[in-house]
């Protein structure tokens, strides 16, 4: 199972869209999604600021803007690495 971390914040349309993509893709590609609100930790808020969403998939990091196709490619690459 692929570990996926989504760094987000409240009222972030792009973040919600990426989460929806990941929820859809989890039916095809087994993944464990952790959603982290950067506003709950000062260090993360300082690190990411307004540059969310950020998705970490294994050794890969995707930064906004993130398209569904970017997630598919990255999830499949991480899946291949696991094998």
Image (tube, rainbow, N blue to C red):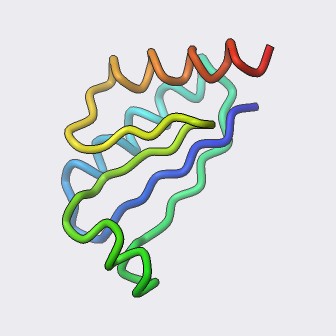
Of residues 35 and 74, the one nearer the viewer is 74
Of residues 56 and 9, the one nearer the viewer is 56
- Relative to 58, say whether 30 is above or below: above
**Is 42 on the left or on the right of 25, as rendered?**
left
**Is 64 on the left or on the right of 30, as rendered?**
left
Percent position (x, y) of residue 50? 19, 66
Residue for point 70% across, 18% down: 81
Residue for point 23% across, 58% down: 51
Residue for point 37% across, 50% down: 54
Q: Quadrant of residue 9?
A: bottom left
- Relative to 22, say whether 9 is above or below: below
Which image quarter is the C terminus in? top right
Percent position (x, y) of residue 79? 67, 18
**Is 2 on the left or on the right of 50, as rendered?**
right
**Is 27 on the left or on the right of 66, as rendered?**
right
Percent position (x, y) of residue 70? 35, 22
- Relative to 18, say whether 12 is above or below: below
Residue for point 42% across, 71% down: 37
Which image quarter is the N terminus in? top right
- Relative to 37, say whether 59 is above or below: above
The extreme right residue here reads: 83
Percent position (x, y) of residue 77? 57, 16
Of residues 67 and 10, the one nearer the viewer is 67
Give the tally of numbered discs: 0
């Amino acid at each position: 199972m692929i570990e996926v971390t989504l760094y987000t914040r409240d009222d972030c349309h792009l973040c919600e869209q990426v989460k929806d993509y990941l929820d859809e893709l989890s039916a095809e590609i087994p993944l464990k999604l952790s959603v982290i609100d950067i506003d709950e930790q000062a260090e993360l808020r300082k690190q990411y600021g307004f540059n969310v969403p950020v998705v970490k998939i294994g050794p890969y990091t995707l930064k906004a803007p993130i398209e569904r196709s970017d997630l598919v490619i990255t999830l499949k690459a991480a899946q291949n690495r696991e094998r």
